[in-house]
Amino acid sequence: MKKKGKRVTIAMDGPAGSGKSTVARYVAEKLGLLYLDSGAMYRAVTVLAIDNNVEKHTSKLIELVKKCNIEFKNNGKTIYLNNEDVSERIRSQEVNLLVADIAKVPEIRKEIVAHQVRIGEKGNIIAEGRDLTTIVFPQADFKFYLDATVQERAKRRFADLQAQHVNTTLKAVELEISERDKKDISREHSPLKAAADAIVVDTTGKTIEEVVDIIVSKVKT
Ligand code: DC
């Protein structure tokens, strides 16, 4: 239960396409919390790698990550990399295909996690990603793990890509999501998994509003 006036930290994990970003954004609005999209930070690092041609040069990329500046504005809706708005570029197909390989590098994770912990220090935050309930905010007041079948998650991602006029097929997106799941689940550092004390919410067949209501009611009651 959220006590009146108490600063609350909500951490939420789940696989690609589980709806975490959209759900977290709505919950943030409803409860007046800061929204932290941790995946966007790994995506921004991927843009950094592409722009500097160091996708395959991990040690050079790590040096760039240590010096770079990643900032959220507009309550987490806009992300800046070295003062450039990269909010659209981080959602490109080029980044989708590269990000899991970049996000598995432990030195990169260490820098990004430290940054996330700093952002969360003031509390009143909802943070979502792959290791928020296990590594970044293990002491969060509320932990949720959002899940859905691969087919449902692929359908959602396919609809997003179609809206962006990306030429692909549902089958290709399903394959891409399965590959990303495998990488996220089996990686050595911070693999995707539900924290033992996380509340698991299966979002298959549920609307965003239904999932938001489940979460808000758990936090309020
Ligand atoms: O949630 P997303 O699709 O924006 O995440 C992009 C990638 O970053 C995905 O491959 C998993 C990775 N990621 C991570 O390793 N740790 C996080 N806390 C968030 C995302």
Image (cartoon, rainbow, N blue to C red):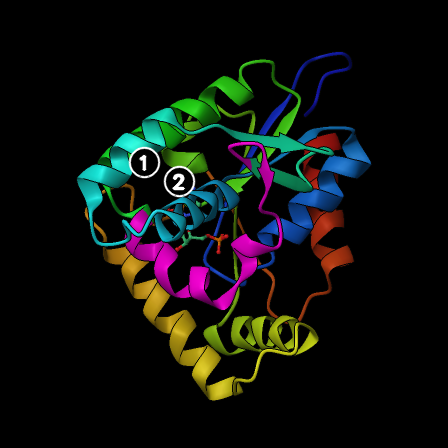
Residue under label 2, please give it: 131
Q: Quadrant of residue 58?
A: top left
* Disc 1: CA contacts within 10 A as few (<14), some (14-19) or many (>=20): some
Query: Residue 189: in sight, yes or no?
Result: yes
For the record, the magenta segment spans 81-102
Q: Amino acid at mark 2?
A: Asp
Residue 120 image position (x, y, % from top left)? 54, 21
Estimate the spatial distance between the alpha carbons at disc 2 and disc 1, rounded to whole Å: 10 Å
Q: Determine if the magenta segment contains residue 99.
A: yes
Asked if residue 192 lies left or right of residue 47, the reply is: left
Q: Which residue is mark 1?
A: 109
Tag 2 and tag 1, C-beta contact below 8 Å: yes
Q: Quadrant of the N terminus?
A: top right
- Please name whichever residue, 190 or 205, is drawn nearer the observer in this view of the structure: 190
Q: Is label 2's Cβ within 8 Å of ligand 1? A: yes
Foreground mark, 2 or 1, reads: 1
Amino acid type of the residue tagged 1 in the rendering = Arg
Residue 208 spot, x, y in % from top left: 72, 59
Q: Where 57 falls versus 169 (above or below)? A: above
Q: At 50% across and 40% down in the image, what residue appears?
A: 38
Tell me where residue 177 sits by quadrant. bottom left
User: For this view, does 184 lie left or right of residue 24?
Assistant: left
